[in-house]
Image (cartoon, grey):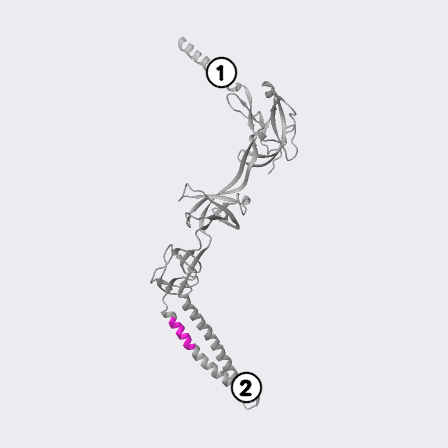
Amino acid sequence: MNKKKIILGAICILLIAGGIYLFRKKTSGGKMRLEMVTVTRSSISNVVTATGTVEPVVLVEVGTQVSGIIDKIYVDYNDQVKKGEIIAEMDKVTLQSELASQQATLAVRKTEYDYQQRNYARSKTLHEKSLISDSEYETATYNYETSKNNYESTKATLEKATRNLGYATITSPIDGVVISRAVEEGQTVASGFSTPTLFTIANDLTQMRVIANVDEADIGGVEVGQKVTFNVDAYPNDTFEGKVTQVRLEATTESNVVTYEVVISAYNPDLKLKPGLTANVTIYTLERNNVLTVPIKSLRFVPDEKILASIGLTVKDATIVAPSGKKIVWQREDNVLVPRTITTGTTSGSIIEVEEGLKEGEEIVESLASSSTPVTSTIERSPFAPSPPGGNKNNSKK
């Protein structure tokens, strides 16, 4: 029993001693030192990402305004066509018969109209001489007006029949390439409330566009003229460039997600981009090149005089307050930390633009760290948050 007690006691002592050692090692943190950073020139960019669909700029659906049977088809998928070129013809027998019938009807109505016109002229002369009654004159006038209206109506019907016969010959409305063909020879098409689509023709596949769906949280930064890059799964190693040409105001809501359509132009000289491809889009809402930048972390550093004194450093104007619209960073001059008032601009990720107050190559304090494990300054705060009493009150510049 005594042996067991002695062993257990020894183990407890070792555990306690180890815990004390680890605690002291953890709390000691090693010797403190300043982390410095150099003011450098960088490029700042903010981006919005979205997905979209590649489309031709001009896409025309060719249909027919008359019902009938497709008699001839002269083009197929991917064929180049010219404006006015015949691409299909419908069976014309029925339409030609309708035209002939209307022509015959028009001839009858024309004969009737000529007769009633002469009769009306005679009746008018006789009525003026009081040789016929008012009733007879009114009858002649009625017959004349009726025949005239019937004649005009038949002319309009004949013009419609002529036009319908013309619709049986289907031509390309633009120069372009046939993207799709929805009919075959011998197929019957019915023109009802909506015109059936026979062909889809794209104008110029070297000029494409991407319709991107941008989330409502990002649409505020998107403007016409901004640079765009995108890629498609078909060519994963290629990056295509474009430009925002339109930001549409109509919102689309799907599964409670609101998006807006952004139209992006895309030059396609080698015809790699095909209609319908899915594009992964990056819109550059901000681009600033060759500007002075510092890490945002350096704006959060606030010197602690007691800690700095332990490593032989003093602080000048420790309670300095930044003027409105300015921020404070710290420089080391020998063994003294000196504040520098700067004006900042736009931010991107972990860096921020310096508009005034620093020069390229200068060094500023980024943080306070230990020699073993990096730590933040004893007082570190957001440069965009209100300062505590006696601290720096830096205001963010948007």
Q: Which secondary structure type mostly characterizes the magenta part of the structure?
A: helix
Please tell me which residue is depicted at 42% across the width and 75% down the height of the picture: 103
Boundaries of the magenta span: 96-105
Q: Quadrant of residue 39?
A: top right
Label 2 to label 1: alpha-carbon separation: 132 Å
Is the residue 373 above or below the residue 290 in the image? above
Residue 240 horizontal/vertical position (percent): 45, 44
Residue type of the residue flagged with mark 2:
Lys
Is the residue 87 above or below the residue 350 in the image? below
Q: Is residue 307 left or right of residue 161?
A: right
Residue 161 horizontal/vertical position (percent): 42, 71
**Residue reaching furthest top?**
2
Q: Nearer the viewer, mark 2 or mark 1?
A: 2
Tell me the tag on residue 360: none
Is the residue 95 above or below the residue 253 in the image? below
Number of residues whose C-alpha sits closer than 10 Å to that of mark 1, classed few (under 14), some (14–19) or many (20 or more): few
Q: Which residue is mark 1?
A: 21
- Quarter of the image that includes the N terminus: top left
Q: Which residue is mark 2?
A: 124
Please tell me which residue is depicted at 51% across the width and 17% down the height of the picture: 24
